[in-house]
Image (cartoon, grey):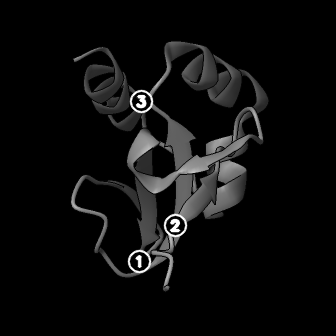
Amino acid sequence: MKVNHIPERMCVACRERGEKESFVRLVSKDGAAHLDLDGNLPGRGAYIHRDSKCLKIAVKKNSLSRALRCSIPEEIYESLECQING
């Protein structure tokens, strides 16, 4: 019997692993950060939990910009906060 594989990702803020659906993906494309809501944009990606605690940690530690190797504009953080809080 074949078992279906469930993709796992790691949060750049808290470093915990989880199912891909529990994360929001950001992509660095052409030196700029973009939210990847569909999960299919090309480029360097970073994942963060859909949790305001992880977002606060990521802002404090600057972990998203380090993971994506580009600066993150304030509007990306605002969009990310809207995605997390609904």
- Residue flagged by tag 2: what amino acid is it? Pro
* Secondary structure state at the residue bearing disc 1: loop
- C-alpha span from label 1 to label 3: 19 Å
Question: Which comes sooner in the sequence, label 2 or label 1?
Answer: 2
Residue projecting furthest to the front: 1
Q: Nearer the viewer, residue 4 or 18?
A: 4
- Nearest to the eye among marks 1 and 3: give it: 3
- Residue flagged by tag 1: what amino acid is it? Asp
Q: Residue at x 59, y 60 (%)?
A: 8
Q: Which residue is mark 1?
A: 30
Q: Nearer the viewer, residue 1 or 13?
A: 1
Question: Is the Cβ of the residue at disc 2 closer than 8 Å to that at disc 1?
Answer: no
Give above or below for 28 relative to 36. below
List x then y, in percent, for residue 41: 30, 74
Q: Which residue is mark 3?
A: 77
Give above or below for 47 relative to 40. above
Badge 1 crowding class, 10 Å Cα cut-off, few under 14, some 14 to 19, many 20 or more, is few
Q: Nearer the viewer, residue 24 or 29?
A: 24
List x then y, in percent, for residue 30: 41, 77
Q: Residue at x 36, y 81 (%)?
A: 42
Q: Which residue is mark 2?
A: 7
